Image (cartoon, rainbow, N blue to C red):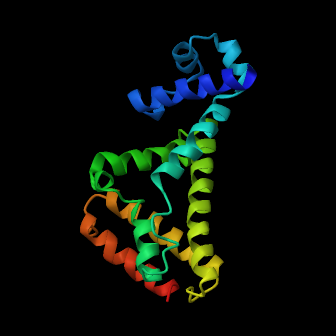
């Protein structure tokens, strides 16, 4: 019964996220959605961060699938570019979405940073790094990397984050149509 109850809580939290977004998640709102008391929820998830953790990883993995990374019929550069372009879905290029990205960083490291915001960003970043690492491991196993995996990871993370910052910077010369060519240049520097 304990695993069933835990899963009911997770399902309730997922419904809330689908209906009202991740910001709607709180101990009280999830408990209400699950039809249980907050103390029961805290038995399974002692902190709100514990609840977020169980939601973040599967959500990011759904948003960042492996696509064709293992399909050797497709050029390695193309496969990695396709995977990395998932960080910039069409909606992300709109100002309100890039602002949400920046807000997540502000909640984690800005002057109004919260422990919850910091933990959430740290967890999201770790899952994201794991996804990119798995793609690089695949290409490394094929002998397709031009540099060591650590160097490739650093360059790609820097370029991804830099593009996100540029997309929200007022007066920037960097635009949505610059994302793919810039990303392709970065991939060309690390993949055969």
Q: Position of residue 7 (x, y in %)?
A: 63, 27
- Residue for point 39% across, 65% down: 85
Q: Position of residue 103 (x, y in %)?
A: 44, 44
Quarter of the image for residue 87 reads bottom left
Q: In this view, does 87 lie above or below 155?
A: above
Work out whether residue 169 or residue 36 is closer to the camera in this orientation and state it. 36
Q: In this view, does 123 lie above or below 41?
A: below
- Residue for point 28% across, 72% down: 178
Can residue 114 be seen at all in this image of the molecule?
A: no
Can residue 57 be seen at all in this image of the molecule?
A: yes
- Residue for point 64% across, 14% down: 38
Q: Is residue 2 above or below residue 97?
A: above
Work out whether residue 58 or residue 159 is closer to the camera in this orientation and state it. 58
Where, quadrant-wise, is the N terminus in this rendering?
A: top right
Quarter of the image for residue 137 reads bottom right
Q: Is residue 93 above or below residue 191?
A: above
Work out whether residue 155 or residue 6 is closer to the camera in this orientation and state it. 6
Work out whether residue 58 or residue 162 is closer to the camera in this orientation and state it. 58
**How many numbered tags mark residues here?**
0
Taking the image as shown, residue 43 lies to the left or right of residue 155, namely: right
Quarter of the image for residue 34 reads top right
């Amino acid at each position: 019964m304990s695993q069933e109850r835990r899963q009911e809580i997770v399902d309730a939290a997922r419904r809330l996220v689908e209906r009202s977004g991740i910001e709607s998640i709180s101990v009280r709102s999830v408990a209400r959605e699950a039809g249980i008391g907050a103390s029961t929820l805290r038995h399974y998830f002692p902190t709100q961060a514990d609840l977020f953790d169980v939601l973040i990883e599967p959500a990011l993995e759904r948003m960042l699938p492996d696509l064709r990374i293992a399909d050797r019929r497709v050029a390695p550069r193309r496969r990695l570019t396709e995977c990395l372009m998932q960080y910039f879905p069409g909606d992300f290029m709109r100002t309100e979405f890039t602002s949400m990205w920046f807000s997540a960083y502000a909640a984690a490291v800005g002057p109004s940073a919260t422990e919850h915001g910091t933990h959430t960003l740290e967890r999201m970043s770790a899952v994201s790094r794991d996804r990119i690492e798995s793609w690089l491991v695949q290409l490394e196993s094929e002998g397709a990397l031009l540099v060591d995996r650590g160097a490739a990871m650093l360059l790609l993370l820097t370029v991804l984050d830099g593009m996100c910052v540029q997309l929200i910077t007022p007066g920037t010369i960097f635009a949505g149509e610059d994302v793919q060519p810039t990303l392709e240049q970065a991939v060309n520097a690390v993949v055969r």
